[in-house]
Image: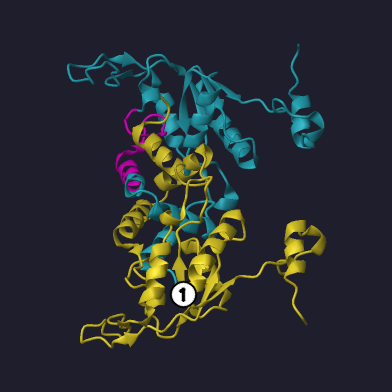
Chain colours: A cyan, B yellow
Amino acid sequence: MTTPGSIARLMEELGRLPGVGPKTAQRLAMHLLTRPRAEAVALADAIMQARERVRACSLCQNLTDLDPCSLCRSPTRDHRLICVVEEPKDVSAMEKTREYRGVYHVLHGAISPLAGVGPDDLRIRELLARIARADEPRAGSDTSVDGGLTGHVPMERPQVREIILATDPDVEGDATALYLARLLKPLGARVTRIARGVPEGGDLDYVDEVTLGKALTGRGEL
Amino acid sequence: MTTPGSIARLMEELGRLPGVGPKTAQRLAMHLLTRPRAEAVALADAIMQARERVRACSLCQNLTDLDPCSLCRSPTRDHRLICVVEEPKDVSAMEKTREYRGVYHVLHGAISPLAGVGPDDLRIRELLARIARADEPRAGSDTSVDGGLTGHVPMERPQVREIILATDPDVEGDATALYLARLLKPLGARVTRIARGVPEGGDLDYVDEVTLGKALTGRGEL
């Protein structure tokens, strides 16, 4: 036995992380054991604290410390615009564009019969409930500095104007978008899908034919 | 602010790990937050436990739960043969060959003037002390199942017969090996360096010229 108990266990636990093979697990374990103790403690503590505090926002289902999350609370965001994405990381990706001022809804997955994921496994009920509740007056979600201690301003939740389906541009994402479009259209809001086309900065002859085909089909007037 | 406090902190701490960029840190954080809680707790716990228990073996300086480590305690290893390596992971690599039955000495680095690492920063003193002590009788290191409770068998530590320098085949590793050879040769033991040559299974025309040159220089009689 060359790797003693607690090192072997650390490598095993690190090896469960996505994209971390035995070699990387060993490198990470050695890093955690040879760097200052405070660094390893900080990581362990960050994991525990995140698991303790983070939950799904009751409105948009994104992961958050605070419920409702900062985006759902924000008075500067357009709450009549909901962008539906598959995963929490897609929210970060959308935010980085700085193009979007609406709010989000995180499905936590996409419909995938092959992976055994059906509509009931996603946060679709919560999306429908959110749109249905949109006309009712809403208490709470006060964003003032007193943290809502001295009383809250009841805010009207505005009628949803548009739902942007920003699920991934793959088979599962498209299936999910189609499914949602059928459910959401009867509710009156505009339902849109993000555009497909050639990515910025690419070389046209390196673009795959399916993407190029979609770029042609979706061409716009100049 | 799109990523709330404790998620951002978790991503930051994960991002300190070697080879983990912001994108990977985000993926790992989401994994730790969305998989069963027990998995995240197990990782945090493994980190803390390893930091708590693991120390350098007082003989070979390898990281271990147990002092002396299982290799230094082993009665089936040849304690007259010491293989000197740079890092604990090199011990695992050597053990995987199943060719080596001696013991190890881990330097925890290599001499590198550029990185500001001198001989005093490595566990060279410990290596010299170990060889100097080799003739003295040694108590303890009892490997019987009773864990040494009922008394220990005093073992002679045998005279060191050969020191194999298995530092990395690069500038720093070579400099360290040369430095050690000069220190160790006067002590009487045989000092050897692992062979340089073409790696197994390679294509000769893909081997770099330096390696091929060393393979020529180091050629052996058939």
Left or right: residue A181 compared with residue B196: left
What quarter of the picture does the C terminus of chain B occupy? bottom right
Q: Chain of mark 1?
A: B
Note whether residue A126 is visible: yes
Left or right: residue A5 compared with residue A114: left
- Tell me the amino acid under the disc marked 1: Leu
Name the residue at 69% across, 25% down: A200
Note whether residue A185 is visible: no
Image vertical order of residue B42 relative to residue A142, above or below: below
Q: Is residue A67 magenta?
A: yes
What quarter of the picture does the N terminus of chain B occupy? top left
Tell me where the magenta segment starts and ends, as one range. A44-68
Give A173 or B215, whichever is nearer the viewer.
Answer: B215
Give A70 or B213, whichever is nearer the viewer.
Answer: B213
Pinpoint residue B161: horizontal percent, then vertical percent. 49, 81
Name the residue at 71% across, 69% down: B200
Kindly give the residue lying farthest to the front in the view shown: B186
Left or right: residue B80 compared with residue A190: left
Pinpoint residue B107: horizontal percent, then vertical percent. 45, 62
Pinpoint residue B168: horizontal percent, then vertical percent. 58, 61
Pinpoint residue A111: horizontal percent, then vertical percent. 56, 43
Residue B75 occupies quadrant: bottom left
Name the residue at 32% across, 71% down: B67
Q: Which residue is mark 1?
A: B187
Judging from the image, what secondary structure is the residue with disc 1 in?
helix
